[in-house]
Amino acid sequence: MAGKIQDQLNALGVARVIVILRAAGAAASSDATSIEKHFKASELSPPAQLAAAIPKVRTPPPVIEFPNLGVALGTVDRAGLQQLRADKKHVAAVVAAPQLSIIRPTRVAAAKLDKSLTWGLHSLDVQKLWDKGFTGEGVLIGHCDTGVDGTHATLKDAIAEHAVFDDLGRKVKNSSKSPEDTGEHGTHTAGTIAGRPVGNRHIGVAPGALLASATVIEGGDVAARVLGGLDWCVSLGVRVVSMSLGIRGIGEEWHSITQILRAKNILPVYAIGNEGPGTSRYPGNYPEALSVGAVDRELVVADFSSSQRFIRQNDPLVPDVVGPGVGVISAKPGGGYQEMDGSSMATPHIAGLAALLLQARPNASANEVETAIFQSCRVEAGMSPDRAGRGFPNAALALAGLST
Amino acid sequence: MRSSGSGDRVDPELTKQINEAADDEPVGAVIRLVPTSAEAPVPSPEETDRIAHKLLAQAQKSAKSDTPDYNVFRNLGYLVVLATPAYLKAIVNQPEVAHAFPNRRAK
């Protein structure tokens, strides 16, 4: 745990900690009051001049006290941590705040697909690339998620390969011939990447691309399952990996893997998280990842969309870009469609965009594709760069940028 | 591209899991191998296989135990091992190991 606190301090200058108080119950409140001065005012608080422009930003208190448990949760800098550890009268221990794993949608709702394009496809301007014949055909995208419903009308022609991985990252031999989803998340994200049109209604950014879909999560985080999926994707020659999963906070264990994917000319497109301003998840928050946050149909950054600024020269601000992440209609296991909100939903949009660009320019490197996406972005009037990164991409501009 | 972090070769949580497990209780560790050349960030698939099996054999000899459950990720330069604490202690201290972290993190 000490390593985790140090990782956060090194990367951000602050760390999220739990303080085990000496007392419990009513007496714990007294302890909590005594130590409050060691915590920083929440790093989530925007400067006053920005607060008016971002009225919906949440500002949690500096310390959250749980008197019945005898603990307090808050953010400290190095000095604060030292002071807490020295306060033997009120503090029994200081530990890193626990990290969650799966980036779950913040909302799921029934939906009808009644337009020819979802709002996300329309806003990204993908039609312009489709009109030029660029649908992602010939591009294989790695999809590491809960699985995928291979019987869905939009997906049955989209899945080139499917595999399920066990807790040691081994491909399960007796997995079903027809790909299945262990939940709903994977089918939804797969549909956004490469869903085929049904009755002239589109949900997929790259309706000509193919997926190598790896079932690597279904609750809990087991590193080897994800490694197995990524290793398999690499062996199949994917050009892009779309991963809407991550671990809250800072951790180094996935950094080398992300660097390896880039070194192999694979573009890792990862969700940034759904815990709001001042937060992010790894591996999405590494410089080598193309991290994606969420906007709604007015292109306003969603309250839940994570964003964070790191103490580093390379790519200090995450997410890199934002994508359609509110009211996203995509495939539902068993048939039909549903809406979900989350940075998980924005991520496959950008992965699909990368596939369109790679069909248009097959020899483009992952770095070149990423640069073209970045340079196509616009920061809309209601966006703060601290929340939206480079902003919202445009498919036509990205293609033009890749061609020059 | 620089990485940030504590630089621990063995993740503190893995150390904790190893130390807290009973002698015969398996613990899962994910291991990254040291690159074999300055030009490539990861050993080749063949090298990854060779080094992984060398590590496993050395640890088996040192810990005097049976071959554990393991898997090698040939394209990424990683392996995962599910083994007793003694076996894992033997393996993570080898010079071929760049980093080791737990397969499952505590909730």
Image: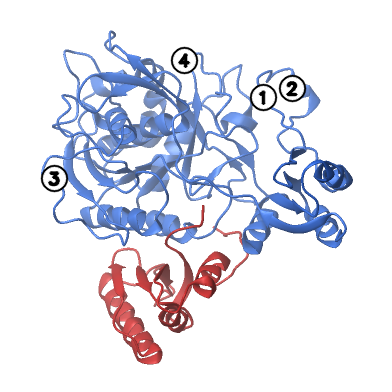
Indicate which label's residue lies in the foreground, 2 or 1: 1
Q: Which residue is pictured at 26% across the width and 47% down the height? A: A214
Label 4's element? loop
Q: Quadrant of the C terminus of chain A?
A: top left
Label 2, residues with CA under 10 Å away: few <14, some 14-19, many ≥20: some
Q: Which residue is pictured at 36% across the width and 70% down the height? A: B82
Tell me, yes or no, whether dots 4 and 3 are on the same chain: yes
Q: Quadrant of residue B27?
A: bottom left
What residue did someone put label 3 on?
A176
- Cα separation, mark 3 vs mark 1, equals 45 Å
Image mark for residue B104: none
Chain that the image shows in red: B
| Residue B60 or residue A54, whichever sits in front | B60
Q: Earlier in the sequence, mark 2 or mark 1?
A: 2
Label 3, residues with CA under 10 Å away: few <14, some 14-19, many ≥20: few
Q: Quadrant of the N terminus of chain A?
A: bottom right
Mark 3 — on which chain does it sit? A
Image mark for residue A51: 2
What residue did someone put label 4 on?
A297
